[in-house]
Amino acid sequence: MSDMTGDTASLSEAKGGSDAARISEVKAWLTSQFESAGKQVASFDYTHRSIAHLHNLATASQAKSQAATIVANDFRQKASEYRAQAARVREILESAGMAQESLPSNVVSSAQVLANVANLLNIRDTELSSFLVAMGDISLRKTGVEEKRAKAQKDSNVLLDYTRKAIQRLTYLKKILAQLEDDVVPCESQMENWKTNLEVMAAKEEQYIQQYKKYEMLLNRVGYSPNISHRELVEMAEHRKELEKMTKPVVDTLRSYQDLPPDKALAALAIEDKKRQFAAAEKYLEEVLQSALETSDE
């Protein structure tokens, strides 16, 4: 436990020493920066977060300052070398009688243009080969720019075509939307009419279902079977006609008895005879119907 406490204390001391070193570095950097600008360092609280942020800024600034110093020294050295070379070239030209003061104005202006072109082409001499290489490089760059421009023009035309089609589609959709908005009121009235008709049809459907159930119960009561076909119904109708033909003479005879003299005994006998004949006809009719129903069930 004591070892752990000692380690924690040592870590805290190391952390405190590191923060103190960072604070001193930050203060020195801030002082140098503000003094170079002719101002004083503003007072603020040195927190752990602010010290870390300022220390990172100071480190980056010092690295960039060192890099800038190296580059500046290199430029100064190159400038001194260029000045020395220019002095030697001037001496050589003066010894050859080609000093700038002795040259005609057109030669000086041409040399100045040549120098400007060399600077523009980023070449360090005036050799013809250097100019040709630079011009070739510019031509290649120009070709690349033209290719990129053609590609951009093509993409622009494609986008323009897409935009034109999108505008046409938008116009068409707006027209359809306006048409749909105009059709809203008639469609609503038509929907109300359909709703009313639907309610009426639903009521009729319920009525027809009740009637269907009623008729179904009636058919079941009279012994109707779904197996009875149209042909069997036709046969039963033909049997009915035959029975009507058979009972017609009996009916005619009964009608003829209406003209007989009012003899009760004879009339009673005639009536009993006709009743027997009528009962026999009804029995025959029932047998025929029963046979037809049994045939349909089979």
Image (cartoon, helix red, strand yellow):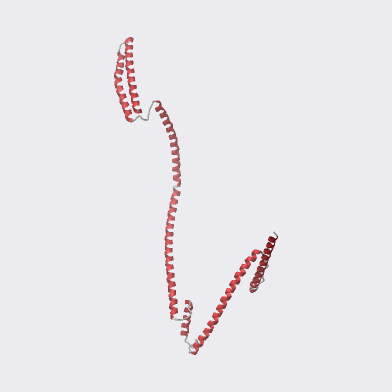
Q: Quadrant where the N terminus lies?
A: bottom right
Left or right placement of residue 28 versus residue 132 in this view = right
| x and y, in percent, of residue 14 in the image | 67, 66
Quadrant in the rendering for residue 236: top left
| Residue 176 visible in the displayed image | yes
Residue nearer the viewer, 170 or 158 = 158
Task: Examine the rendered structure and indicate whether residue 64 appears above or below residue 210.
Answer: below
Image vertical order of residue 76 relative to residue 91, above or below = above
**Residue 186's quadrant in the figure?**
top left
**Count of number-bearing discs:** 0
Front in this rendered view, residue 3 or 99: 3
Q: Position of residue 167 (x, y in %)?
A: 44, 57
Q: Position of residue 296 (x, y in %)?
A: 34, 28
Residue 45 visible somewhere in the drawing: no
Q: Toward the viewer: 190 or 65?
A: 65
Return the x and y of residue 5 as percentages of the image width and height.
Answer: 69, 61
Q: Residue at x 43, y 63 (%)?
A: 155
Towards the viewer: 114 or 298: 298
The structure residue drawn at horizontal position 32% and vertical position 28%, both measured from the top left corner, is 232
- Up-down: is 161 above or below 242? below
Quarter of the rendering occupied by the C terminus: top left
Q: Residue at coordinates 40% horizontally, 27% vertically from top-left? A: 220
Residue at image coords 46%, 85%:
107
